[in-house]
Amino acid sequence: MAAASWYHWDISRVVAEELLARAGRDGSFLVRDSESVAGAYALCLLFQRHVHTYRILPDDEGLLSVQTIQGIQAQCFRTLPDLISAYQHPNNGLVTPLLYPVHRARRVPDEDSDGEDGRGPGHMVPATVGTWPSAPMAGRTHIPQQLHQRLQEQVHSSPASDFMGFVAEYLNHHVQLDLETLHFGHPQLRHLSTALAMACRALHSEIDFTLAGLETLGRVFDPPVSPRSPAREQGLLTSDPDLELLLHKLSTVNSLLSSLEKKVLKSLQEMVSRHNLALPSMVMAPPPSAKPLAVQSFEVKAAKSQRVVLVVDVESGTVAITKRGSGSPEEVITQDKILQLIKYQSVQSKVRLVCARESQKSLSKDFVFPSARKREAFCQLLQLMKIQHSNLDEPELISVYVGTWNMGSTPPPRSLASWLTSRGLGRTQDETTACIPHDIYVIGTQENSLGDREWVEFLRASLKTLMAIDYRVVALQCLWSIKIVVLVKPEHERRISHVHTSSVKTGIANTLGNKGAVGVSFLFNGTSFGFINCHLASGSEKTHRRNQNYSDILHSLVLGDKCLGGFDLTLRFTHLFWFGDLNYRLDMDVEDILAHLIKKEFQALLAVDQLNLEREKNKVFLQFSEGDISFPPTYRYERGSRDTYVWQKFKPTGVRINVPSWCDRILWKSHPETHIVCNSYGCTDNIVTSDHSPVFATFEVGVTSQFVPKEAPGSGPEALACIEWESVEVILKTTSRSKCYIEFHSYCLEEMQRSGENTFQNCDIPGFLKLGWSSKHLPVLNPILPDLEYLGDQHLLLSIKGVESCESYGECCIAMRSMIGSTAQQFETFLFHRGEETGSMRGWMRVRVPTDRRSTRERLYEWISFEEEDAEAAANPPTCPEPAPQRPRTRPRSLPEAATNYTNPAYFIFEGIP
């Protein structure tokens, strides 16, 4: 049966409310999939400018019923249309009868306007794939309708869903003709044979290639009796898409594979016995040991512009200070004597080293490096020194490399050294630190024509050559030519757990994998990571389509803890990295773009970058971060060179303009009050096989491990930590008037907790709902461990859910570190749902920690701090550094200043409704 037009599939609650608001008439309605119960529906009904949502639930027998007001007898229906028809009459428990259906928009197939990933004329995919079948065509029998329904059931679950386009084409246009042929007594399914031949066209060249290789190998061990006949040679290399020929080839391949191993074994045994050969013993070469870090020297300016040389020896754990021209060091500082490293913000090349002395006082030394990059290299080496010489069993700081490259369907060059060592253009690694191995490498590619295993082994071999480390594979996930590979150092393999992979297709009708995303998630000890590599729709005019791709990926990618499946994907991980060929372009004439590029005026171009513009509008990548772009656009270069952009593309339909753009990007989003620093962001300038340049970014990331308390938790109430709430206020962007409750999730809680219904509600301002909870209706939460050191690393995930629908109106994340204390602290944050900003939350809370559990320690990444230049402090450097003042809690950086009332359309401003 065809889907009714009022059924809108899996659209979000926000989109449903927007459609009903546009309809504007009381009694307007639509049905969408429920977000809280699988297999259920949500009936959305407009009445008096408010949207009322009712759940439609199936029972054990599959009968559907509406959850309405109490006292109304529930009615059961076999089909959704029957249910909707019944509720078009009054007095059925709804606020108003269902009067005006809001029809869903017809999905238009989206083709790649740039012609990327073209599959040739034989790659036919109809627009009906991925949507419910439309109304039956005139004269179509019931059998094709059943086949359509079966196809739709398979299209999302079958691993061969890429093949479904041919099947749908056959069912749409040709199965009826085959049925008529059968009706007249002819058993040949001519149209099916034609469809299968077209679908298998690509198999011919693949089989010819495989067959030729197998026969060559066979002839090596089987001296030919007679040459192969020319007729057979010609028959194997033909491109005629005949099914009989294809079956013959498959049979030949099957026969060769089954006999080849026996033939090779027999041949080798005969050679050994005939020539009395002794087979050499296989001696495994020892794995290469990691390259020791070379001693690095930095020429810097010290006090009174005196030039000195800093010699950093990571292996021995020392920093030597030598006067220029002097042979022996003036002072040698061991790593345990370095108390603090302060980077100055105003002078990017300046650093202060605070060292302990034998006396009570400490000593500060200021150094100015030739460049900011040299300073960062020095700091990175000192950080590495601290890590290597720490006595910790588990790491607190790791380095993560993320790379993305659209390979343009061509093999890579022999060396990927510049890409994997972050060298080229932009913010790159200094040569002194470029070959320091990272703990995790995450490589995302698009239009990658290499086989999966071939690509992984190529990456591992490249890293082994560069770093002398045999990296282990954590995960590989592929979708057509979109691939993501995660590699880790061998010593970290045991620290990786809960690995999940997923993929989402966003190509034509969301069933083709030429566009889409692949993702990997895992735990590194106690820190959750998510990585998403995507290839979005191409074409300068396809901004909206790219935004929709992002939304589809966010909604459909299945990663992370299943218990957090109801939360926005971007909130499920401590750190989420999103990268790939995002395909956002520059909104500027190509001549103007080229003129700016000649002058290296990147800021003028970044001001018209579509991704930046869409992020400013809160359309995509809300609250994500991106490193500063100081490298030229990575697309569209002439292959074989990085000197010329090829912005004209000649197609049968005319000339296509592809302006130079930053298509390839790396973004990230982390939980609040976690440690993450982007150390490099750039592109290579010597890998020229594709029309895209590879892009890289490296990160310093703080991680947590399994916390082991020094003492067992006490049993009395005073020995427990507790999370107390004084009040919570929520503002939602919604036309609903539903009562709500709050769900609380955290790894520090034994199970999910929930509040009571809101005690305050106001919807006087159209389009907004203000809710409030008092302390009596908010639960006291008891973490499983009461230690301050443990609780400071924990986060709370909150979800605002409607009482009627049990669907989320928005989710958020709160860091517990700033909430620890004896007095209540204020928090404020945004709410998100399915990638959209849906409201805001603020309130007062405190985390009480028992007195005997308040001990803590400095983390490895906390000894490096940032400080603005202070003229007075620089003139009189302190002999003992003051403890770093606690950062004042301010409004979120992207949150506008509060307005006096709600006439401001920025609904997330925290002010009372007058």
Image (spheres, rainbow, N blue to C red):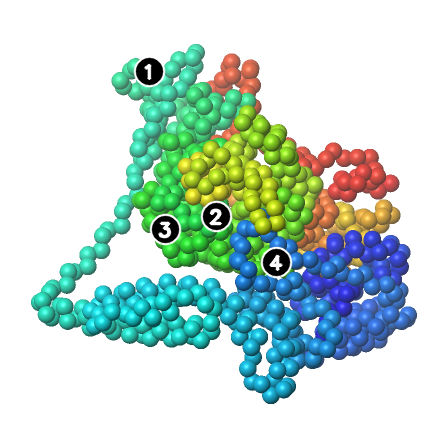
For this view, does 666 lie left or right of residue 263? right
Q: Amino acid at mark 4?
A: Ile
The furthest residue to the top: 304
Q: Mark 3: which secondary structure?
A: helix
For this view, does 767 lie left or right of residue 786? right
Q: Quadrant of residue 424?
A: top left
For this view, does 734 lie left or right of residue 119? right
Q: Amino acid at mark 1?
A: Arg
Report crowding for label 2: few under 14, some 14 to 19, many 20 or more residues within 10 A (C-alpha).
some
User: Which is in the foreground here, disc 4 or disc 3?
Assistant: 4
The furthest residue to the front: 231
User: Which is in the foreground here, disc 2 or disc 1?
Assistant: 2
Earlier in the chain: of badge 4 and badge 2, it is 2
Residue under numbered circle 2: 408
Earlier in the chain: of badge 4 and badge 1, it is 1
The correct choice, above or below, for 862 with respect to 670 in the image is above
Measure the alpha-carbon separation of dots 4 and 1: 65 Å
Q: Mark 1: which secondary structure?
A: loop
Q: Position of residue 635 (x, y in %)?
A: 53, 40
Report crowding for label 1: few under 14, some 14 to 19, many 20 or more residues within 10 A (C-alpha).
some
Residue under numbered circle 4: 508
Q: Amino acid at mark 2?
A: Gly
Residue under numbered circle 3: 458
Residue under numbered circle 1: 324
Q: Is residue 330 visible?
A: yes
Q: Position of residue 350 (x, y in %)?
A: 47, 22
Earlier in the chain: of badge 1 and badge 3, it is 1
Measure the alpha-carbon separation of dots 1 and 3: 45 Å
User: Which is in the foreground here, disc 4 or disc 1?
Assistant: 4
Counting the numbered discs, the total is 4
Earlier in the chain: of badge 2 and badge 1, it is 1
Q: Is residue 623 visible?
A: no
